[in-house]
Amino acid sequence: MVKKLQLKDLYDGFRDPKTIKAYKKLIDIELENYDKTINIMEVCGGHTHTIMKYGLPQILNKKINFVHGPGCPVCVMPKERVDSAYELSLQKDVILVTLGDMIKVPGSRGSLQDARAKGADVRFVYSPMDCLKIATENKDKKVVFFAIGFETTTPMTCALLEQVIKNDIKNILFHINHITVPEVMRALVDKKDNKIDAFLGPAHVSVISGSKIYEEFPLRYNKPVVVSGFEPVDVIESIYMLVCQFVQNRVELEVEYKRVVSFEGNIKAQELVDKYLIKTSFEFRGVGTILESGYELREEYKKYNAKLVYDEILPKNRAKENKACRCPDILSGVAKPLDCKLFGTVCTPTNPIGSCMVSSEGACSAYYKYGNLLK
Amino acid sequence: MCLSIPSKIKSIDKDTNSCVVDTMGVERTACLDLIDQEVKVGDYVLIHIGFAMNKIDEVDALESLKVYQEIIEKLEEKEKQEALNG
């Protein structure tokens, strides 16, 4: 008889210090006769956060080197899109609604937080569905949902649009900034100076997309991928799985986070995305423009597209970045936060210069918060 | 923004296709529009920005926890043997 699962098991079991130490030991045993460094890119900002919070670079074998990736939607948002959100929020008839740390990202003229200080109605919501309530309570205003995120959040935006259409809600518009993981991973491994030997595959992106989206990396690029959960035991077990692949000379796609990730993913969510959105190019901050790496509303839903409705007021020029900020190199896995001269001096969480410091999942923010562990 | 934690379904509202979940002792509502499997009270789901994304497979979760325990026991046994052999 299998023991019934308790909620506590899911929290404590996957954070158990004894298990972490046991895996550390297993990794050491495997690497005893392995003489190379393994550079592992954690694509997702959630993993960066876990790695730093639990001090994995300090406890793990020195042959393991973490390279931080571009998997934080706030960090890779180009400045001109932040500027668009800023302009939209200043429109008298607009309530700008967004998620996460988006509100703090500095644009050319300021952040959404600054726009709010100027009187703009900017709201941060816990769920896209909260837009429905805001729209009902503010019928004289247009609610613009500034939609951000990778594969994880894209279907949620589509579920909101479905409700908007179903209930014939006339005052919700969408500014779509959704992006996709495999395209940006491909852009990075295509770079000549990339330092990536293997990938730690994103957890919740994969819940939606399935692990199938990473098949090409072991097959075409000779880079192993292990899809990992976010808890520290998940991450260290995934590192162990990658180490075993290197030691045994295997190059495969494996899933550690089997309790939620399947090969095919959440088909219902994928179909919802296909119904409303179409692939388009997106300029990833730090990486550049990547074909078919973003989404846009399909032509038939253009009346919900804030980019078309407010076309005249949206900025058209490319925004300048601070030259000293090394966010682009950090997001491409070329540099680490400590390589940036601005880190911790000019650029801090209370005065972020670059996007990697703004988001709590950005590599700079994680280094700043848990940096004492590095000394 | 990707940190989401497992939650236990406490109740389901079929009219609004939503559920009330317990996440580390905090109760909140989540939308079920993206769930294509049958979910029932007592199931574990992954919640992200107000949506249930997927069910958590109990067998797989328990299997992982069991494997972890076995690894610890094996290593402890090995250490004991090494200490005894001096």
Image (cartoon, coloured by chain):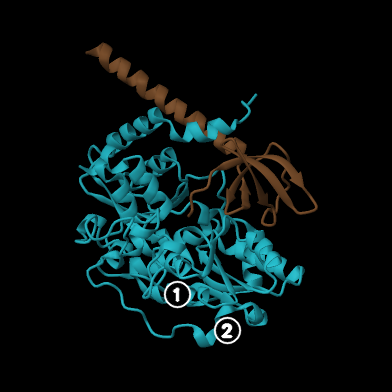
Residue type at mark 1?
Arg
Q: Considering the image in quadrants, where does the C terminus of chain B appear?
A: top left
Label 2: element kind: helix
Label 2 environment density (alpha carbons within 10 Å; few <14, some 14–19, many ≥20): few
Residue A91 in sight in this render: yes
Same subunit: marks 1 and 2: yes
Along the line of sight, the residue nearer the viewer: A333 or A167? A167
Label 1 – label 2 distance at C-alpha: 14 Å
Along the line of sight, the residue nearer the viewer: A348 or A331? A348
Label 1: element kind: helix
As drawn, is A57 to the left or to the right of A48?
Answer: left
**Within the image, what quadrant is residue B57 found in?**
top right
Write down the residue under mark 1.
A81
Along the line of sight, the residue nearer the viewer: A234 or A321? A321
Image disc number at residue A308: 2
> Where A153 falls versus A93 (above or below)?
above
**Within the image, what quadrant is residue B26 found in?**
top right
Question: Residue placed at 42% from the left, 60% from the top?
Answer: A72
